[in-house]
């Protein structure tokens, strides 16, 4: 069988490696955060690391200050204005992580998930991870569960599916996203992006949406990143919803499959990678309502996206 799974304990969580022994592709999933922490592939006669992950050798250190690498953003993504929102005439204030005055990237990015099941066959390796949130943050006192399925397929294809279930007795607000950082070289400056968008969400100086969608065609034709600073949210064109990251030798394709109509692009200051973030709604959607899901008791919400690495054929 060409796929296998290795599980290694680390501090108070585990690192799970899904391996395609034929292609030597390996993805590493941390059960803390259920996040993609590493993706090793074979390029032109050499091994490449194409995800900027976390150094967990000393445990969960500086995850937030290092940019939430790979993070699962739930029950909201990006910024929530002043960490507050109102539902059913009640105003809630989040307790968890703030950057300046705004809450950032949800409350489950450091949750320790349990391994529900694993499976390997001739086509793929798969792991199901589960977490039951019990309303412990006073700003989100609603029970819900996450079931996350990571799967490594043939041809360097990775899929991740999230199933959210409302376990509370009331309707709850919900947004979902991922925060992986991808790279193809030592710097993203020589990497190009192609993305067909219906528009770019306009932000204020605090990177909060102002309710306007600006026409956007900057990346409709492949454009080199060079010294661009990106921290932008796009409404993806549903008919051509892939985001292509590439250089002269390789490509990474990010393609949402279900319930991720928005994409955030972010370039960190070290210029080593770029965050390509699938989002179910726009930042601060608990307040602006754009893309917000209102989940009824016992309702399920399914979201799915895919990543694929491709080696280009070099000219003779």
Image (spheres, rainbow, N blue to C red):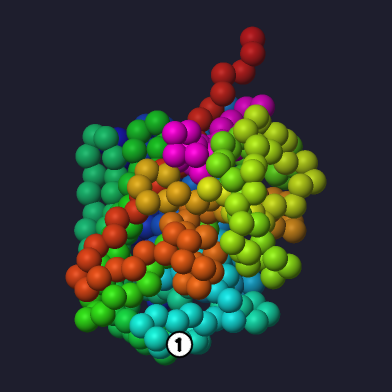
* Most foreground residue, 111 or 146: 146
Residue shown at the point (64%, 43%) measured from the top left? 215
Q: Say if 99 sits above or below 278 in the image.
A: below
Q: Say if 179 sits above or below 287 in the image.
A: above
* Most foreground residue, 162 or 291: 291
Residue shown at the point (40%, 88%) measured from the top left? 90
Residue 275 in view in this figure: no
Task: Classify mark 1: residues with Cα within 10 Å, few (<14), some (14-19) or many (20+).
Answer: few
The part of the chain drawn in magenta is 236-255
Report the quarter where the N terminus lies.
top left
Question: SS for tag 1?
Answer: strand
* Most foreground residue, 160 or 29: 160
Question: Does the segment drawn in magenta span residue 37?
Answer: no
Q: Residue furthest top?
A: 316
Residue shown at the point (22%, 58%) measured from the top left? 117
Q: Residue 316 at what x, y percent from top left?
A: 64, 10
Q: Residue furthest right?
A: 227
Q: Which residue is mark 1?
A: 91
Residue 201 in view in this figure: yes
Residue shown at the point (70%, 44%) measured from the top left? 188
Q: Residue 265 at what x, y percent from top left?
A: 61, 51
Give the image quarter of residue 224: top right
Q: Say if 148 sits above or below 221 in the image.
A: below
- Left/right placement of residue 24 relative to residue 284 reads left
Give the image quarter of residue 116: bottom left
Q: Residue 19 at what x, y percent from top left?
A: 37, 44
């Amino acid at each position: 069988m060409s796929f296998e799974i290795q599980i290694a304990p680390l501090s108070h969580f585990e690192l799970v490696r899904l391996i395609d022994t034929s292609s030597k592709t390996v993805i590493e999933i941390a059960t803390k955060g259920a996040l993609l922490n590493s993706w090793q592939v074979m390029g032109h006669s050499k091994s490449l690391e194409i995800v900027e992950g976390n150094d967990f050798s000393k445990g969960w250190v500086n995850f937030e200050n290092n940019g939430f690498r790979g993070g699962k953003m739930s029950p909201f993504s990006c910024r929530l204005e002043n960490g507050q929102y109102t539902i059913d005439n009640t105003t809630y204030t989040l307790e968890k992580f703030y950057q300046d005055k705004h809450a950032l990237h949800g409350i489950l990015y450091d949750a320790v998930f349990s391994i529900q099941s694993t499976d390997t066959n001739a086509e793929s390796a798969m792991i199901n991870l589960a977490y039951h949130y019990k309303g412990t943050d006073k700003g989100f006192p609603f029970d819900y569960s996450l079931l996350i399925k990571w799967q490594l397929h043939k041809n360097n294809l990775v899929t991740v599916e999230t199933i959210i279930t409302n376990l509370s007795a009331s309707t709850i607000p919900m947004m979902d996203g991922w925060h992986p950082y991808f790279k193809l070289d030592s710097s993203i400056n020589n990497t190009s992006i192609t993305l067909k968008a219906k528009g770019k969400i306009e932000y204020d100086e605090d990177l909060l949406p102002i309710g306007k969608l600006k026409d956007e065609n900057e990346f409709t034709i492949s454009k080199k990143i060079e010294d661009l600073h990106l921290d932008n949210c796009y409404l993806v064109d549903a008919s051509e919803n892939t985001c292509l990251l590439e250089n002269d030798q390789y490509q990474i394709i990010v393609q949402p499959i279900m319930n991720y109509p928005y994409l955030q692009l972010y370039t960190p200051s070290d210029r080593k990678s770029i965050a390509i973030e699938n989002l179910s709604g726009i930042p601060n959607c608990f307040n602006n309502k754009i893309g917000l899901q209102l989940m009824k008791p016992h309702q399920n919400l399914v979201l799915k996206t895919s990543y694929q690495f491709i080696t280009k054929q070099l000219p003779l």
